Image (cartoon, helix red, strand yellow):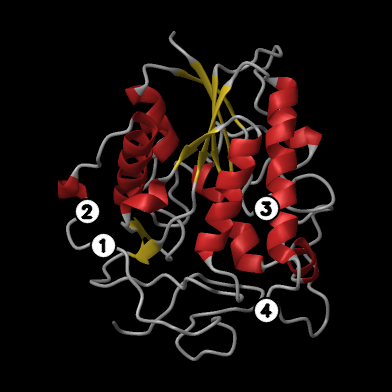
């Protein structure tokens, strides 16, 4: 059987019928979203678990889920931490944590709730009349850091002996694009700052960091965020390299070096940004 490995994440790590029952999912066998990811084996986490010779214990991902937030499904909550346990309460030997892009995309849990996200605590899908998310509020990064720390504390509380590996956030690239498409400061806080918060929280809680962003490579994504089947292979390769201290196979990343031509402080109000509203996107259409 090998190591028992659990996954805690957002839509990128979901798969219908595998993810904990009741959690929102994005990927399914019908390929509803046209990513080419049609089997659990296509996902980044399944490929990493296979390489590790392990077995999936629990997939505690939640589509649209943030780390921050006042209640379930925020990843800082005890309810989410308990989801990494097996059906009979088994504890994992290892936990793969890949979450935070929705915190980056919304800018705050308040914006997620007011924007009508079904993944907000309470599950409301009613957008507040006239609400348009803008810049992240003052203190948003500090709140993310606190929430990430609480999430790791929660994992430690239910699985104190588990090796916890926290993945940094990295740029997706719209499938078919010959150049980077990621918006690096969507709401006025850089993704690099979110990654620094992840690293600090991991160090404070005795967790490992799988710094996938450090390789300076994009992954292919159907919409700039959700990996295609190729993007899942790329994420798996980057994750495994980061976890084992190796280098990713360059043949999987031809022309996929990360870069940005943008010096704007945020994407809000920029005509190159695909969307910064309640249907936000991490895509920038500025040409390099």
Where does residue 90 sit, x and y in percent of width and height? Answer: 66, 12
Quadrant of the rendering where the C terminus is positioned: bottom left
Q: Please tell me the numbered disc located at residue 66.
A: 3
Q: In the shown orientation, is residue 40 left or right of residue 229?
A: right
First in residue order: circle 3 vs circle 2: 3
Q: Are marks 3 and 2 in contact (CB under 8 Å)?
A: no
Instruction: Identify the residue at image location x=83%, y=82%.
Output: 129
Q: Secondary structure at mark 4?
A: loop
Which badge, 2 or 4, comes first in the chain's sequence? 4
**Residue at the location (44% across, 34% down)?**
45
Please report contact status of discs 2 and 4: CB closer than 8 Å, yes or no.
no
Which label's residue is closer to the chain start, 3 or 1?
3
Q: Secondary structure at mark 3?
A: loop
Rounded to the nearest whole Å, what is the CA distance between mark 2 and mark 1? 7 Å
Q: Which residue is mark 4?
A: 135
Dot in front, 2 or 1 = 1
Residue at (68% x, 19% y) in the render = 160
Q: Look at the numbered discs 2 and 1 and tell me whether their residues touch, using CB distance below 8 Å.
A: yes
Task: Quadrant for the N terminus, please.
Answer: top left
Callout 2 environment at 10 Å: few (<14), some (14 to 19), or many (20+)? some
Q: Which of pointers 4 and 3 lies earlier in the amino acid sequence? A: 3
| Residue under pointer 1 | 257
Quarter-of-image position of residue 240: top left
- Left or right for 245, reference 192: left
Give above or below for 72 relative to 126.
above
Give the labeled residue for mark 2. Answer: 253
């Amino acid at each position: 059987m090998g190591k028992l490995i659990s996954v805690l994440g957002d839509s990128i790590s979901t798969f219908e019928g595998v993810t904990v029952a009741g959690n929102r999912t994005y990927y399914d066998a019908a390929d509803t979203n046209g990513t080419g990811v049609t089997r659990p084996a296509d996902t980044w986490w399944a490929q990493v678990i296979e390489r590790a010779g392990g077995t999936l214990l629990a997939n505690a991902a939640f589509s649209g889920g943030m780390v921050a937030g006042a209640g379930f499904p925020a990843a800082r909550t005890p309810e989410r931490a308990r989801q990494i346990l097996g059906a009979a309460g088994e504890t994992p030997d290892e936990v793969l944590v890949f979450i935070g892009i929705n915190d980056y995309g919304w800018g705050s849990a308040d914006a997620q709730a007011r924007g009508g996200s079904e993944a907000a605590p309470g599950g409301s899908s009613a957008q507040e009349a006239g609400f348009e998310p803008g810049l992240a509020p003052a203190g948003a990064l500090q709140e993310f850091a606190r929430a990430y720390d609480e999430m790791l504390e929660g994992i430690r509380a239910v699985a104190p002996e588990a090796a916890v590996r926290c993945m940094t956030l990295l740029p997706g690239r719209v499938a078919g694009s010959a150049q980077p498409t990621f918006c690096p400061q969507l709401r006025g806080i850089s993704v690099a700052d979110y990654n620094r918060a992840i690293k600090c929280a991991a160090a404070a809680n005795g967790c490992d960091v799988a710094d996938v962003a450090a390789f300076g490579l994009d992954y292919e994504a159907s919409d700039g965020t959700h990996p295609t089947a190729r993007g899942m292979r790329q994420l798996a390769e980057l994750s495994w390299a980061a976890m084992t201290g190796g280098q990713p196979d360059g043949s999987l990343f031809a022309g996929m070096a990360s870069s940005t031509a943008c010096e704007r402080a945020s994407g809000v109000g920029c005509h190159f940004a695909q969307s910064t509203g309640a249907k936000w996107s991490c895509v920038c259409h500025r040409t390099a």
